[in-house]
Amino acid sequence: MTRSALAVLGFAAAVLPAAPAAAQVAAAPNGIELPAGYRDWRVIASSHREDNKTLRVILGNDAAIAAARAGNTNPWPDGSVLAKLVWKDGRHAAWESAIVPEAFVHAEFMIKDSKRFADTGGWGFARWKGMAQTPYGENAEFVQECFGCHLPVKDNDYVFTHPAMLP
Ligand code: HEC
């Protein structure tokens, strides 16, 4: 084997472990796979929960961002995926009144497919916990907990978030 072929092999071995993590993450108990590329999605809104001291950002895939920008969110069109990323509150070391994201709590998703998820308002729910991205839920019934808590906003297509104002 030539030297350059060896170098290429060495390079491949070095980069393989850094391949997208989504493929290595187990599916949620209802069969939903971790949506690929969610780390690069764009922001729809943010929120802060005072009761459990967590910061959240709500992101959307391209379809959800297009719907949000067009004000086309009731209902959200099929293909829209909303993500909520949650971190524990931290304090900025150099500016103590600033609350900043600290430990990563979970990533959770709502996937709009009005046929596939007809039983839960057209939304598929799934959550992955912590940096290890462990799927949440003992069995597929966990979605009743999600859906049940989102029922009060049925008239807003089961979505709490209102896209943040943008100039
Ligand atoms: C105790 C009530 C409750 C439960 C249970 C719950 N949610 Fe939510 N969810 C909320 C509230 C309130 C918001 C909006 C406030 C915020 O940003 O946290 C929200 C927001 C979201 C959002 C952003 C879109 C939106 O509706 O604003 C996603 C995605 C989401 N939840 C997914 C899930 C998934 C998946 C589960 C189940 C594993 C779940 N939720 C369970 C109350 C709940």
Image (cartoon, grey):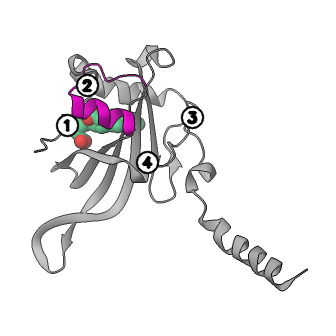
Decide which of tag 4 and tag 3 comes sooner along the chain: 3
Mark 2 vs mark 4, CA separation in Å:
20 Å
Residue drawn at the location 57% of the way across and 57% of the way down = 20
Question: Ligand 1 near label 4 (Cβ, under 8 Å)?
Answer: no
Q: Distance between the residues labelled 1 and 2?
A: 9 Å
Q: Nearer the viewer, residue 156 or 29?
A: 156
> Image quadrant for the N terminus?
bottom right
Badge 1 amino acid: Pro
Structural crowding at the residue carrying mark 4, measured as other residues with C-alpha within 10 Å and reported as few (<14), some (14–19) or many (≥20)? some
Q: Position of residue 70 (x, y in %)?
A: 23, 29
Question: Considering only order in the chain, which callout, 4 or 2, is on the residue closer to the N terminus?
Answer: 4
Magenta part of the protein: which range? 62-78
Picture coordinates of residue 60, whole percent (x, y): 34, 40
Q: Residues at badges 1 and 2 in contact (C-beta under 8 Å)?
A: yes
Q: In this view, does 16 lie to the left or right of 109?
A: right
Q: Position of residue 152 (x, y in %)?
A: 22, 22
Question: Pointers 2 and 4 in contact (CB under 8 A)?
Answer: no
